Amino acid sequence: MEVNNVKAYGTEAAEASLDQLNINRRKPTAHDVEIDILYCGVCHSDLHTARNEWHNTVYPCVPGHEIVGKIISVGDHVTKFKVGDMVGVGCIVDSCRECEYCKEGLEQYCEPGMTGTYNSPDKYLQDTPTFGGYSESVVVDENYVLHIPDNLDPAATAPLLCAGITTYSPLHHWNVGPGKKVGVVGIGGLGHMAIKIAKAMGAHVIAFTTSQSKFDEAKRLGADEVVLSKDEEQMAAYRGKLHFILDAVSAEHDINAYLALLRVDGSLALVGAPEHPLPVAAFSLIPGRKSFAGSMIGGIAETQEMLDFCGKHNIAADIEMINIDQINDAYERLLKGDVKYRFVIDMASLKNK
Ligand code: NAP
Ligand code: ZN
Ligand code: ZN
């Protein structure tokens, strides 16, 4: 298969920092579009993967699955896009397309396994993992590419491709809307999107944060109420009050403290994916018939639905733009919860290197 060699930023080992490297991208086939990457969001999953915290990383690893860019070439059979279109690529770049889940638009739960934008076996190139968006360009089958609404700022839209869909999908699935009290735990990249989206869906939103500085501004993001989760008295005031909780915390924390806040038949969906297990007590669930669930990103059609919803409601991420050589610093700041609320890499900083 013919390839182009392009600039990227990634890591060779769990303990190494990220640095510039060159990777191969396939030359576009008939169903592919080639995208000049303008912006790429920095998801905490990028950090978990680069450092092998989920114990499945193949090196070299080029993270990045919140990609926005312009199409620079299209294959002969491409019908949905043309050169010059502003497009997005999220966490999925392929799937089997035949299993019951793919047919239902749930490609993220594809039975043989979806092809992740990074760290998946590449279906086209032998013996190499897929490489993500910390890169000049990417080649993707048009069926896994999204249209970006015209009215949204492209850089601030990049985080919707993971943080947006990962919060939209469970909020939608658990019927969040008017009359529902919804908790959002952990106000990082995902959490801040969850606040905005749940509010736009019409819910009453309660943000739970460990950060005093976010306490003061969560209301600006759209929260109706804010709780400092380290304060037991503040937490106790919400016991048995919430219909649904979305937990987007990236590290160990006490799930039982949040299950206690659910009403009878309430659900807590975990989207945060900490390295170590989170113990759940039987008696956090049994009295109150509560559900403890998980949710992974969202399918391609649902991702487009989320982008259109965000376009209609004028919702994008609050971002801090960085250059590619600030990425190692940005990871350290992510670990401290010190980002308001998503780093986005200006990819011109890699192209100009
Ligand atoms: P992030 O921007 O780093 O936000 C995580 C937030 O969690 C922090 O801002 C902080 O919020 C809170 N937090 C961090 N450490 C904590 C601790 N020790 N105790 C309590 N709270 C803590 O991360 P993100 O990009 O939003 O991702 C969040 C998690 O979701 C990651 O584990 C990521 O891998 C996972 N993820 C899952 C999916 C999926 O499909 N399920 C998709 C994308 C990401 P406060 O400052 O408000 O407390
Ligand atoms: Zn992500
Ligand atoms: Zn499938």
Image: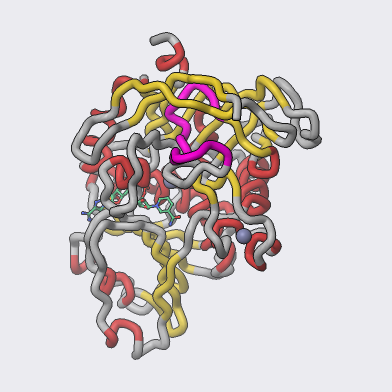
Work out whether residue 285 can be spotted.
Answer: yes
Q: Is residue 249 left or right of residue 332?
A: right
Q: Position of residue 87 (x, y in %)?
A: 64, 32
The residue positioned 62% from the left and 26% from the top of the image is 27
Q: With 49 as the anchor, is 137 left or right in this view? A: right
Dominant secondary structure of the residues highlighted in magenta in the image? loop
Q: What residue occupies the far top of the structure in this picture?
A: 352
- The quadrant of the picture showing ligand 3 is bottom right
Q: Is residue 165 above or below residue 29?
A: below
Q: Between residues 108 and 278, which one lies in front from this camera angle?
A: 108
**Residue in view at x 36 percent, y 41 percent:** 46
Residue 199 visible: no
| Residue that lies at the very extreme toward the bottom in this rendered image | 287
**Is 92 placed above or below 75 here?**
below
Q: Quadrant of the N terminus?
A: top right
Please name the residue shown 22% across and 36% down the image. 332
Query: Image check: 224 left or right of 314?
Result: left
Residue 71: percent from left, percent from top: 66, 24
Residue 46 shown left or right of residue 195 in the figure: left
Asked if 256 appears above or below 93 in the picture, the reply is below
Q: Quadrant of the C terminus?
A: top left
Position of residue 328 relative to residue 335, above or below, is above
Name which quarter of the figure residue 31 lies in. top right
Query: Where residue 343 appears, x then y in whole percent?
Result: 38, 32
The residue at 41%/59% (across/down) is 271
What span is in magenta?
124-138
**Residue 105: % across, % down:** 66, 59
Judging depth in this view, the residue of 253 and 310 nearest the camera is 253
